Image (tube, coloured by chain):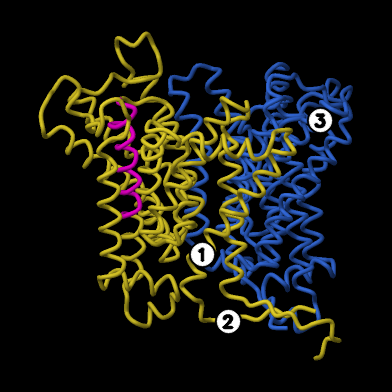
Chain colours: A yellow, B blue
Amino acid sequence: MIKIERHDETSNLIYFLTPVIAIFLTLVTGAIIFYLLGFHPLQALKFFFITPISDLYGLSELLVKATPLCLIAIGLSFCFKSNNWNIGAEGQLTFGGIVGGGVALLFYNHEGFYVLPLIILAGAIGGMIFAMIPAILKIYFNTNEILVSLMLVYVSKLLLDYLVVGPWSNPEGFNFPETRQFSDSARLPVLFEGLRIHAGIFIALFSVFLAWVVLFKTYLGFQIKVSGLSLKTAKYAGFKGKTMILLVFMVSGACAGLAGVGEITGPIGQLHRMISPEYGFTAIIVAFLGRLNPIGIVFASLIVALTYLGAETAQIFLQVPKYTGQVFQGMILFFLLASDFLLFFRIKFLGFKKYEY
Amino acid sequence: MNIDINFLGILIGAIMASSVPLILAASGELITERSGVLNLGVEGMMIIGAISGFALMVITDNLFLAIIGSMLSGLLLSFIFGFLTQSLLTNHVASGLALTIFGIGLSAMIGKDFVGIPGKEFPLLFVNLKEAIPLFGPIFFGHSIVFYFAFLLPFGTNYFLKKTKIGLIVRAVGDSPVSAANQGINVLLVRYCCILYGGAMCGLGGAYLSLIYTPQWIENMTAGRGWIALALVVFATWSPLKVLVGAIIFGGITILQLHMQAMGIRIPVQFLSALPYIMTIVVLVIISRDSRKIKLNTPTSLGQIFYKEK
């Protein structure tokens, strides 16, 4: 018989080891799925996880994809740590992109050092304001933030669609659903000639540093953590719960907005319908995989970014749809959650004795 | 005048038809939530139901098998969720999200060979009555069997929860799993059953889309209906009959929006398409404002992890 016991102290080692276990299990299951689909499992995994990053271009692409994921996940970690379920980061990213893109279009024939900072600021504010909607509705009307933030994703995507088809579409663009190209001073500089990796990565890394400082070195970070662990304790300690809700949503919205603006001023250079391949949703997985820890999130964003690249490579070499990446992303989260079981419970093997009450 | 009345009938019939997947998914999720489990994977289970129903229809050419298969696939997917949350005691919100992401990905993976294949005509009941009776004909007749099932389901669910012993057990488990367990109820078993039932209903809701409503497979064809179904459960304050009302309102918005587009009303298409989502938010605000009303039927242990020291 086996007996399951709860234990409260968890070792740090297991805490950061379980994500590794989860990734390993995902690879094994992935191999099985590929085998069932009629591919050579190891070869398929190689196409998926090794081929995409075997050259410099691939590595640069990995960082291009990891940048927005990392940024959004950093923001989400503030929400999730304090038990606020913002799952509409995709919408906040889109809205940030819209506001930032609007500013970029205003300056489409201007050059100047001030253009890019303005756009980035506008994007961050856009994302922030959009994230305040579910927060304010939660605070004043007690609405479920999961549903509201998610519904707003659809709203923002339709708004973007309207803008790029209608009023903001490129006047010389033959009615393609896209805006003008942004001017050169509205673009994030590329770091290396011939590669797409751009200065947005510094914004992401800076946000990681900032998040680390706030979460681990300030009273505010302490408040956020306590509210996540026990709302009652937080109330008893006199923390302002409502302000906290608004604040974590604003942080996470600003991060998502920055990610959106980083995409349009970085690799894309204009607004069109698909400014994000669901980065906002995938970042939820990144946040969990990184254990809501800023440093962990950096590693997690690289791993999850690889599933995007892998899916693209596999699409070319194996003719599987690019959605395969999502299957892997979902599996990582499944296995991560499942292996968390090891954190809080201990399985004891009691031998085949008769169960005693 | 005759034409107008018939048009009205057809319009109402269309609204009811478009609310069917919402009723099915929301009624299923309602039972799951009443047992204290919050499964956010509705969208994932619906889309898997949609593709497996369609794929089975193409492969076996048998609509009955397709419907049963779609329910089984939704059930299988919900089993993953059940195993995670009930046996491995994981967080409900995160597990449900994983289920949705996984489901959408898997459906596209399975569905890549089924894009562009035309669907099969689904048999409709009482077609002759539809033509014969003005106004009420197109409303009540000439629909598929799933349509009638969906409209009876909330009444059945209501009866089940309020009048049967098992329904009482489900509610007890949702409101206080600890006392239910002390009464000798197998909380885990009850919750597993409710999760699986919810999964099957979501699968059926998805299959309604791909087999009957728009008989074809399109990637991501559920388009957020799973999330609207989740919102509907809150809207209905966990009472089955209000799910019916809510689903018809949302179906109505969807259809009216399509008609407004067709009539060439000078509002951008995207704003009309955004209406159902904005309405969901507005309705949630109105409902949630009164916290007493919400708490009346909310399963007390909703979304909480239940662990019994053995």
Q: Where is residue A39 in the image (x, y as percent from the top left)?
A: 70, 33
Amino acid carrying label 2: it is His
Residue B269 image label? none
Residue corresponding to mark 3? B143
Residue located 80% across and 79% down the image: A1
Q: Marks 3 and 1, Cα distance to the nearest angstrom?
A: 55 Å
Which region is colored magenta?
A250-269
Nearest the eye: B71 or B30:
B71
Kindly identify which chain the residue marked by label 2 belongs to.
Answer: A
Kindly identify which chain the residue marked by label 3 belongs to.
Answer: B
Residue corresponding to mark 2? A7
Q: Where is residue B198 in the image (x, y as percent from the top left)?
A: 73, 53
Judged by depth in the image, the label closer to the viewer, 2 or 3, is: 2
Q: Position of residue B16 (x, y in %)?
A: 71, 35
By secondary structure, the bulk of the magenta-drawn segment is best described as helix
Residue corresponding to mark 1? A17
Amino acid carrying label 3: it is His
Q: Which quadrant of the view contains residue B176? A: bottom right
Judged by depth in the image, the label closer to the viewer, 2 or 1, is: 1
> Dot 3 lies on which element?
loop
Determine if the magenta segment contains residue B232: no
